[in-house]
Amino acid sequence: MGKNKLERFAENLTFENLFQVPYEQIKDEDFHLKGKWKEEYFKNNNPLVLELGCGKGEYTVGLARKYKDRNFIGIDIKGARLWRGCKTAVQENLSNVAFIRTHIQMLNSFFGKDEVDQIWITFCDPQPKNENRRLTCPRFLDLYSKVLAPNAVLHLKTDSKELFDYTYQTLQQQGHGILFATDDLYADTATEDAEKIQTFYEKMFLDEGKKITYIRFTLNKEGK
């Protein structure tokens, strides 16, 4: 393991905005802030927004800068990546952002029923060979529905046309609500500012001439 990675792991232990819970512990016992993030951690009743597979937390931090009246939590399993987002949030005194190091499938251990108001999925691994691991496959959508508030909005932003098409078809087949979709985000004038926050990798994709796709949708929690 590289020296820089070890140093980041060590500094991660000092961040009050980063929560790291061993799998062995969380699989048997829910996290103590489950159902209480707004009142006990953020100390307000503002909407709670998650970014899943947040990587370095660029999008999470970008949203937190832009919307001071919302609470943001970035989730990823890679501690060395999360270090960047945590450190930036500390340096900028962003009190409306936190991070959790865990697997996304453990979402129900960290958040209660109807606790989450919005979810962002930005440039996740499209998993071309394993449909069941795609973050917009039916099993993950069902997982999200357990923590999302009624009429909560989800966002998928990706450079993968295959994942975009798969998600669109899955949402249609499952009877979920597609609010807006475009296969070329930056050519569409109907998008909002939050959707055009750019991460390092997104800028790289754009420089390579790739089109960025985007879907905004809701889940039919009744399963109709």
Image: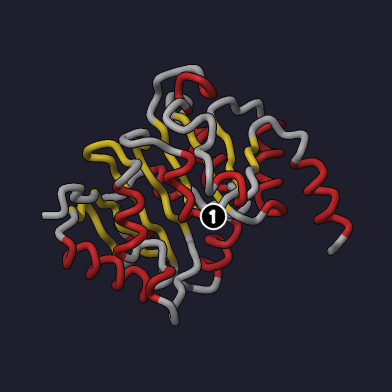
Q: Position of residue 131 (x, y in %)?
A: 38, 75
- Name the quarter where the C terminus is drawn: bottom left
- Name the quarter where the N terminus is drawn: bottom right
Instruction: Judge left or right: residue 141 versus residue 32.
Output: left
Q: How is the image coloured?
A: secondary structure
Considering depth in this image, is 223 or 193 the residue closer to the camera? 223
Instruction: Judge left or right: residue 213 versus residue 171.
Output: right
Q: Position of residue 199 (x, y in %)?
A: 56, 54
Q: Amino acid at mark 1?
A: His
In this rendering, the count of numbered labels is: 1
Q: Residue at horizontal 77%, vertical 34%?
A: 14
Q: Identify whether 146 is placed above or below 169.
A: above
Task: Say which quarter of the image contains residue 187.
Answer: bottom left
Considering depth in this image, is 87 or 212 the residue closer to the camera? 87
Q: Which residue is mark 1?
A: 103
Q: Position of residue 206 (x, y in %)?
A: 50, 66
Q: Residue at horizontal 36%, vertical 59%?
A: 140
Q: Position of residue 163 (x, y in %)?
A: 37, 71
Task: Say which quarter of the image contains residue 49.
Answer: top left
Task: Say which quarter of the image contains residue 87.
Answer: top right
Considering depth in this image, is 162 or 37 the residue closer to the camera? 37
Q: Residue at horizontal 18%, vertical 62%?
A: 174
Which type of secondary structure does the marked residue at label 1 adopt?
Answer: loop
Q: Residue at horizontal 68%, vertical 30%?
A: 16
Specify few, some or many for label 1: CA neighbours under 10 Å numbering under 14, 14-19, or 20 or more: some
Q: Identify whether 102 is placed above or below 39.
A: below
